[in-house]
Amino acid sequence: MASVEPVPGRPAAVVDTGIERTLVVADFHAGIEAGLRVESGVHVASRAEERREVVHTMLDSTDPDRFVVLGDFMHSIGSPGGAERGEVEVLLEAIDVPTTVVKGNHDGDIESWVDAAVTDGTGVRLGDIGFAHGHTWPDPAVLAADIVCIGHEHPCVRLTDEVGGSRIERGWLRGSLEREPFTERELDQDWSEPELVVFPAFNDLCGGTWVNVNENFLAPFLPEALPSAQAYLLDGTRLGDYGRV
């Protein structure tokens, strides 16, 4: 049976597609530190080695059949610089299972050089799970799956205490995917009411959508396609309906 089980304390999940077990991360944003220097003048030491170690530790502990990057493997939208491309290549060199990259809006022509299977922007269905980045409308085959997984949104919640202090935490959104926003997409199949799982960004430097303070969502079908969903922190804490947190 298809399932998505978050890795405790990590922005990643073990996804059983009904055919194989996959380790899935979204929004890796390799080389983001170089991008921050150019875009914002912010100097941050490279965390490439730390990101690589986290991925390999999870691969060792979960023993999947496949590694899936749910879009935005890279950070720069144009051609990747040496450090960014190098981070991706070094990471993949040591992975001994097949890798699938679901192409995101930051991934440029990654299919021309990366050692992995690369989908187009509308995503791919693997077994009973649909994978799409979320920056564009998913392929109908993705929407016909039992569970649809997307990234792109970088969901976060703003938590406040009784004295006015606040902090931002990455999290997950899980809920029933509503058909109405897709009615003009000429879907041929019957609507199966799939569950939508919105993944947190793997990279903690890339910000996100504060889903509980009525920010504009990034995906073209959100929030209309997800009027109600449960929010969870990375440690598994269930916060309840994301709009009421």
Image (cartoon, rainbow, N blue to C red):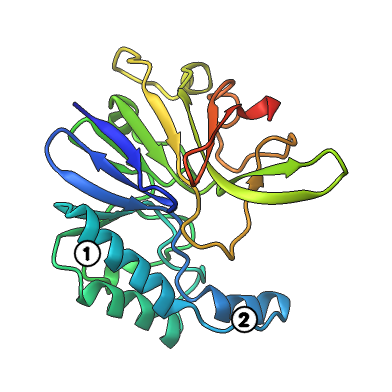
Helix, strand, or loop for circle 2? Answer: loop
Q: Is residue 18 visible?
A: yes
What residue do we see at 52% from left, 37% from top? 237
- Give the x, y percent position of residue 16: 21, 38
What residue do we see at 62% from left, 51% from top? 208
Helix, strand, or loop for circle 1? Answer: loop
Q: Is residue 117 visible?
A: no
Q: Earlier in the sequence, mark 1 or mark 2?
A: 2
What residue do we see at 42% from left, 66% from top? 108
Q: Quadrant of the C terminus?
A: top right
Q: Amino acid at mark 2?
A: Val
Residue 84 to residue 153: above or below: below
Circle nearer the viewer, 1 or 2:
2
- Give the x, y percent position of residue 105: 48, 56
**Residue placed farthest to the bottom in the image?**
82
The alpha-carbon separation of the residues under discs 1 and 2 comes to 29 Å
Q: To which residue does mark 2 refer?
A: 44
**Residue placed farthest to the top in the image?**
190
Q: Which quadrant of the structure image shows residue 99?
A: bottom left
Residue 185 to residue 191: above or below: below
**Residue placed farthest to the front in the image?**
163
